[in-house]
Image (cartoon, rainbow, N blue to C red):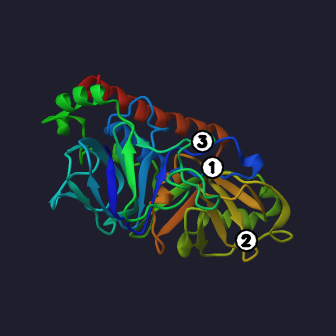
Amino acid sequence: MGFEILRPGALSTVQDKGRRGFLSQGIQESGACDKYSMKLANLLAGNLEEPETAAVIEFTLKGGEIRFNSDEIIAFAGGDMKPCINGFPVPIFSPILVRTEDILTMELAASGLRTYMAVYGGVKVPSVMGSRSTNLKCRIGGLEGRALLEGDRLKSGKDLRQFKKIRKKLKGNEKLAAVGENEPWLRHSSTPYRFYGDDRMVLLRAVMGPQENAFTELGLNTLIRNPFRLSMDCDRMACKLEGEPIEMKNGADIISDGIVEGSVQISSSGLPMVLMADHQTTGGYAKIATVISTDIPALAQRKPGEWVAFQYVTPGEAVAICRKEEDKLRNFKERLRNIIYG
């Protein structure tokens, strides 16, 4: 029961919301880089009660090939890797019924960078320190703490009786549960854009600090007035950016202190780096700002060479934005419950 990896793709790992509460012990949070798409995929696949904790597969840049060894309900969200079942295209942002011996193939991402495949019941791997997420650096979680390889077999954690009930209701009604093309606001996180002439780029909202006093007024303004391009040195740990150097008062070094996902460190070169899901637990570079959780998913879908911009928001504004985003997914969950999964 489950599925087998025939080709793993560029980088495919098991992820959930992450391993919370262990930073003081030197254990990174890990988890999905685009947590919005992870939760949306889980909702579409019927994991209404645990969209944050049901484990999914995160494909980066290029998906692989999977053979299903049992009937399953799956769903894709995030980047579009043009998934096909037995050679026929299937939609993203929609529940999909797959049968035993079906073959899933995926391509290079046509849009975005990361695609999330959820399966009803979640991907069944052991929970380590409260999470099933793969921590590649510590080699814990997921499947043996590593990226997926050819020949790996994974199971879903579905309850068979409930699965049969939901499958019967879903068959022929998949479009009722899908997120349509006329709902782009629901397909992706609610991150705004900034325009520079004809160029449109993701606008990352960030709370200033905690070391804003380490920067000159010019430096603080440089972050929000200039666009920055993702370098080739971007991964699950951090997105390093290129652009106008940010002026500091007395250099970038500080006594190492805690790091969170979204921290914007300024290196000795004056260039920013935004810490992502596999960020280190402490850092010795001054942090000019922290990108809000609502906008990290949009950054996680940017490819090297693409541009982003920054805007300061207050802590109160950040909380209001986050609550609005949670309401959006909560309302969609109720919609699914009323239409299909109730």
Residue drawn at x 38%, y 70% as measured from the top left: 198
Which is nearer the N-term, disc 1 or disc 3?
A: 1
Instruction: Report which residue position mark 3 lands on.
Output: 318
Q: Which label is found at residue 264?
A: none
Tag in front: 1 or 2: 1
Tag in front: 1 or 3: 1
**Residue 252 lies in quadrant:** bottom right
Alpha carbon of mark 1 to alpha carbon of mark 2: how far?
22 Å
Give x and y (percent) for residue 6. Answer: 31, 63
Density class for disc 3 (Cα within 10 Å; few <14, some 14-19, many ≥20) is some
Q: Amino acid type of disc 3?
A: Ala
Say which element carries label 3. helix
Which is nearer the N-term, disc 1 or disc 2?
A: 1
Q: Which label is found at residue 267?
A: 2
Give x and y (percent) for residue 228. Answer: 56, 70
Q: Amino acid type of disc 1?
A: Glu
Give x and y (percent) for residue 5. Answer: 35, 59
Q: In this view, does 144 lie above or below 197?
A: above
Say whether residue 189 is visible.
Answer: no
Say which element carries label 1. loop
Q: Amino acid type of disc 2?
A: Ser
Which is nearer the N-term, disc 2 or disc 3?
A: 2
Alpha carbon of mark 2 to alpha carbon of mark 3: how far?
25 Å
Q: CB under 8 Å between callouts 1 and 3? A: no
In depth, the one of 182 and 18 nearer the eye is 18
Alpha carbon of mark 1 to alpha carbon of mark 3: how far?
21 Å
Give x and y (percent) for residue 172. Answer: 12, 36
Instruction: Report which residue position mark 1 lands on.
Output: 29
